[in-house]
Each structure stands twice: as structure tokens, then as C-alpha cells.
Image: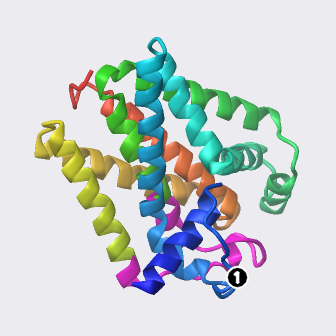
Amino acid sequence: MKNVIQSFRLSLGFLTLIPIGNLANIEKGDLSKSLYTFPVVGLLIGAICVAAGFASQYLLASPLHVISVLIVASIVTGGLHLDGLADTFDGICSWRPRAEKLKIMKDSRIGVMGVLVLIFVLLAKYVSLTALASHWWLAAFLAPMWGRWAAFYTLHFFPRAESQGLAANIKNSSQLQFLIATTFTLSVSLFTLNQCTVPLVHQLALLFILWIFVHWMASKISRSLGGVTGDTCGALSELTELVMFLALGSPLFALT
């Protein structure tokens, strides 16, 4: 249990700006052993976003609560995944050789494609959450968990694009850890969706869509860059969240 708590604290300190105390006693490189707790951190982020949304809905006029959800998500994570999203699209949309794409992604300056994709994703999230009406909380709660599972899935199954860097230093998780993380994510999702009386077949369809998207997108990025990086994991997190927002707002679920 002590190891699980340490793993969770390390993931929390890495993925968010939430103060978690001194991590000096945790061995360097233990992030590799903590990846399976990423979805738990995502669930916590989702809970914080939902709390902020309900507070704003009570205090402010609709749809300002949706804006507060997006702002709080960015603040809690320090914009970590949004930065990865912009860097990734600056690189892969440059249409240059692989080595140059990776070099562009390391540049701290943001390019046109990075700006455009940030605007598109944030605007699409806002519109999707607004369209979900009273069910906005469902997407805000579950999407961050799936976004972090997507990052974990990518690091578990895909090669690294570089021999140095954050992702290169993270070793693959064990099959048991992958099973634990995936079981947790599926269980929480099915339980929560069931509370909204979403038919089981539709629940399974949503989860299948998310998995297909994550694998397809990670494959595309991996082919473009020769593997994945920390930035691409952040990009996958943001895009997976958006896919969940859009899917829940589709006629298939009839939540709107």
C-alpha cells in the first residue's frame, strides 16, 4: 500500500501543480513504476473541475461554468498537456524530415499550427460541454481520466522517438500495471455512465471509440516521428478528452 501511495503522489506531482510535500525519499526514475496511477490522477482532476463547474453554476450565469471548468483544468495541470499539444502539431504539421520535426517540438516558441490547434481544441471543448447542458459534469468528470489513460497507453505500447528526454527515460510498465490501470478506468467509466442511465451497449461503444482513437492517433504520430515523446503524450491526453466530449454530445447517447 505504501508503494501505491508513493506512486500516486509522484504521478500527482508530475501531472499537476497540486502541492504534495517532499518527494526526496522517492528514488529517481520511479515515475516509470507510477504510470499506472495516471488515470487516478486524471479522475481527481476531473472531480476538481466538476466542483469548480458546480460552484460557478451556482454563483454565475450559464454557460460561464463551462469556461471555469476549462480554466481550472488548465491551472491544475499547469497547461502541461496543452503545451504538448501545441508542440506536437508544430512539429508534425511542418512536413519536414523526422529529425527536424523533433527539433521544432523542442523549441519553446509556439508556431502558427500550435496556436490554431489550441484554439480549435479549447473552442471545441467549450461548445461540446455547453451542448451537453445538464450532463456537462459527466464529460468533465470522466474525460481527464481517459486523457491520462491515453498517455499511459501510449507509453506502454509505442516506442520512444528519441534516446534522450522525458519519455525516453520512462520504461514500459508491466502487463499487471496496465491491467490495473485499464480495469480502474473502465470500472469507473461504466459505473458513472450507468448512473446517467446510458444503455450498456452505448457505454461499450463509447469506450471502444476512445480506445480506437487513442491507438490510431498514437500510431499516426509514432509513424511521423519514429516513436512518441512527452509532448505527444500530452497531445493525446488533450485530444482524447475532446473525443469524449464530442462523443457524449452525439445523438448516440441522447444526453443533450
Residue at image mark 1: 24
Q: Residue at x 49, y 57 (%)?
A: 148
240 above or below 242?
A: below
Quarter of the rendering containing residue 229? bottom right
Q: Secondary structure at mark 1?
A: loop
State yes or no: residue 151 in magenta: yes
Query: Vertical placement of 65 versus 106: above or below?
Result: above
The quadrant of the image that shows the N terminus is: bottom left
Write the start and end of the magenta stretch as one range.
149-177
Residue 188 sits in quarter:
bottom left
Residue 22 horizontal/vertical position (percent): 67, 75
Picture layout, residue 78 above or below residue 34: above
Residue type of the residue flagged with mark 1: Ala
141 within the magenta span? no
Residue 218 percent across, percent down from the top left:
53, 58
Q: Position of residue 18 (x, y in %)?
A: 61, 56
Pick the residue in front: 39 or 171: 39
